[in-house]
Image (tube, rainbow, N blue to C red):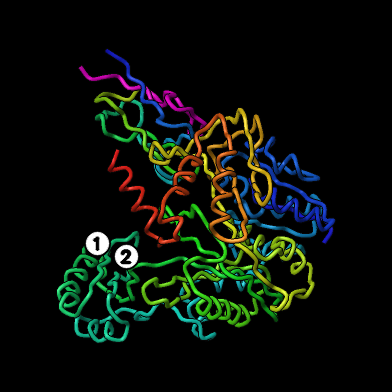
């Protein structure tokens, strides 16, 4: 691998350029008309215009990106996260053009992107999934029988549903019998299909995910991250290791992730996502992400392993240079996502010009960003402007240092979520890690009510 | 007759139609009520409707389809009823 095209923008494009440079690989950026002065375009060795501002007309146009790679003399393509990163058709197009795709092959992306197929892989590898009925249940009696197997509380879901509609949570058999008919009728009216299925309802779920690296034959895990502070399914704070699981669960969950990877012959960096039932300590596989993730730096910091460099080495055909015994975790790392949104106005997105920036720095603080004075937060792309990642010997030290780091961050020109992140650090439940996937939204709702 | 200009609530990309396959929200000469949607602004992957704001008759679109607009920028001109 001599010349790498980065099919992305923003902080992850900058991150990939840096890893490539560390490995002596030349970089080619693609830039939309809105991004000609963007950090990734300025930093790369070469830049190729890719089309108008809207991503649907530039960064998401598979043919244009493949053509840019071929014409610029690149021999490999890194998709980053988002955009084309988990499109099997793009991975295939890159391979068909005779170029190396930095990620798993198209078949693996397709298989793991299909929830049903991914659950089958998990089952074959002996990895637990959320207990439930594989398909619809015929009536209330069958639902009751199934619920005995699954265990209460159960969630009744409309097979044809979506967006949270047609869902009922029931805690016992009597409630299930009453709810089944109502829910099924509702589903029939709303979706034209009254078929219901059952799933275990996890009252207090933590979102914990295991980072893996595989070379197609062998796989290792790089421990786990917890991403339980979420708002509208967007992660806000992530940390490694998870403060919500013990050593026994950690050992089982990481081993399960490695088995799953070896089961599919996984090649590249990937992440196995799990839900942990905070009440029972059980964990269940939900899906696999076949790309580098936004929150990868917290893993890098506790393990000392450059995940993007590993992706590039594996893509170049090198066997995994790590055995499990080579991977050790040290201390605690936390990542805060800074977005150009106004927390005081319902997180309204806030594009605009950046007048002045002061980035956090100092011991054990890393800021991954594309921000610079006179740069522009474009309305075309997502609102993430920086990630502040902080390490400490233990969680308390990392959080105390996070306070210092976030206090240093100054972004003038657009509102950001920095003030909210600082406020989170003052919450006792955050300091004690007493949270689940619903905590942040409940807290925000309470806080809005108090005003 | 008074002229009203519906404005974008936020900076972003203005759309005259809900999706590429649909017709424009409104066309010149069309009667609208205050709560009718006349446009859509996308900003950072979130979508915000633009409403007419008054009862009246559409005169013209002032912003192009897929044009970048600022908060407060007029996007549709409407002749107010009465």
Q: Residue at x 57, y 34 (%)?
A: A411
Which stretch is magenta?
Answer: B60-82
Do tag 1 and tag 2 residues touch (Cβ < 8 Å)?
Answer: yes
Q: CA distance from mark 1 to mark 2?
A: 8 Å
- Residue B5 visible in the current orientation: yes
Quadrant of the drawing holding the C terminus of chain A? top left
Q: Which residue is mark 2?
A: A161
* Same-chain status of marks 1 and 2: yes
Q: Which residue is mark 1?
A: A190
Q: Is-magenta flag for residue B72?
A: yes
Q: Residue at x 21, y 63 (%)?
A: A189
Q: Residue at x 49, y 60 (%)?
A: A227
Percent across and percent down for residue A389 are: 61, 52
* Left or right, residue A246 beside residue A201: right
A48 in relation to B4, above or below: below
Quadrant in which residue A224 is drawn:
bottom right
Quadrant of the drawing holding the N terminus of chain A? bottom right
Q: Residues within 10 Å of mark 2 (few under 14, many from 20)?
A: some
Q: Earlier in the sequence, mark 1 or mark 2?
A: 2
Question: Looking at the image, which is closer to me, B16 or A374?
Answer: A374
Percent across and percent down for residue A346 are: 38, 40
Question: Looking at the image, which is closer to me, A35 or A285?
Answer: A285
Report in which chain the residue with disc 2 lies.
A
Percent across and percent down for residue A60 are: 60, 51
Kind of element beneath mark 1: helix
A342 in relation to A58, above or below: above
* Left or right, residue A439 beside residue A96: left
């Amino acid at each position: 691998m001599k010349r790498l095209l980065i099919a992305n923008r923003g902080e992850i494009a900058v991150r990939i350029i840096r890893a490539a440079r560390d490995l002596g690989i030349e970089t080619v950026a693609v830039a939309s008309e809105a991004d000609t002065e963007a950090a990734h375009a300025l930093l790369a060795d070469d830049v190729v215009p890719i089309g108008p501002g809207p991503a649907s007309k530039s960064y998401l146009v598979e043919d244009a990106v493949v053509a840019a790679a071929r014409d610029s003399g690149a021999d490999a393509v890194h998709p980053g996260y988002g955009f084309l990163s988990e499109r099997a058709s793009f991975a295939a197009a890159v391979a068909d053009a005779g170029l190396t795709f930095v990620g798993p092959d198209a078949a693996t992306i397709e298989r793991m992107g299909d929830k049903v197929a991914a659950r089958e892989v998990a089952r074959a590898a002996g990895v637990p999934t959320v207990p439930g009925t594989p398909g619809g249940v015929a009536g209330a009696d069958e639902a009751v029988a199934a619920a005995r197997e699954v265990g209460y509380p159960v969630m009744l879901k409309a097979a044809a549903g979506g967006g949270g509609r047609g869902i009922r949570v029931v805690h016992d058999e009597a409630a299930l019998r009453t709810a089944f008919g109502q829910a099924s009728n509702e589903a029939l009216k709303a979706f034209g299909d009254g078929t219901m299925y059952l799933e275990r309802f996890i009252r207090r779920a933590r979102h914990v995910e295991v980072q893996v690296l595989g070379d197609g034959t062998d796989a290792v895990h790089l421990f786990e991250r917890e991403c339980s502070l979420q708002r509208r399914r967007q992660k806000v704070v992530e940390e490694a290791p998870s403060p919500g699981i013990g050593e026994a669960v950690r050992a089982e969950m990481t081993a399960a992730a490695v088995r799953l990877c070896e089961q599919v012959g996984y090649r590249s960096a990937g992440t196995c996502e799990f839900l942990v039932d905070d009440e029972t300590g059980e964990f269940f596989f939900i899906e696999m992400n076949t790309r580098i993730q936004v929150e990868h730096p917290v893993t890098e910091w506790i393990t000392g392993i450059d995940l993007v460099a590993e992706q590039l080495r594996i893509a170049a055909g090198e066997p995994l240079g790590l055995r499990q015994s080579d991977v050790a975790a040290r201390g605690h790392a936390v990542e805060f996502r800074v977005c150009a949104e106004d927390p005081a106005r319902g997180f309204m997105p806030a594009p605009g010009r950046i007048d002045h920036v002061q980035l956090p720095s100092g011991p054990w603080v890393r800021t991954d960003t594309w921000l610079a004075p006179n740069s522009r937060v474009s309305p075309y792309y997502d609102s993430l402007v920086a990630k502040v990642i902080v390490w400490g010997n233990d969680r308390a030290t990392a959080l105390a240092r996070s306070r210092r780091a976030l206090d240093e961050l100054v972004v003038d020109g657009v509102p950001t979520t920095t003030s909210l992140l600082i406020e989170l650090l003052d919450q006792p439940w955050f300091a004690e890690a007493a949270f689940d996937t619903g905590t942040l939204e409940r807290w925000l709702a309470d806080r809005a009510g108090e005003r | 007759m008074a002229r009203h200009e519906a404005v974008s609530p936020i900076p972003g990309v203005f759309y005259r139609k809900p999706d590429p396959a649909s017709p424009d929200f409104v066309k010149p000469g069309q009667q609208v009520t205050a709560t009718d949607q006349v446009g859509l602004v996308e900003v950072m992957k979130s979508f915000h409707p633009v409403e007419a704001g008054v009862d009246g008759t559409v005169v013209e679109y002032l912003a192009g389809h897929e044009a970048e607009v600022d908060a407060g920028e007029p996007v549709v001109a409407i002749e107010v009823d009465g």
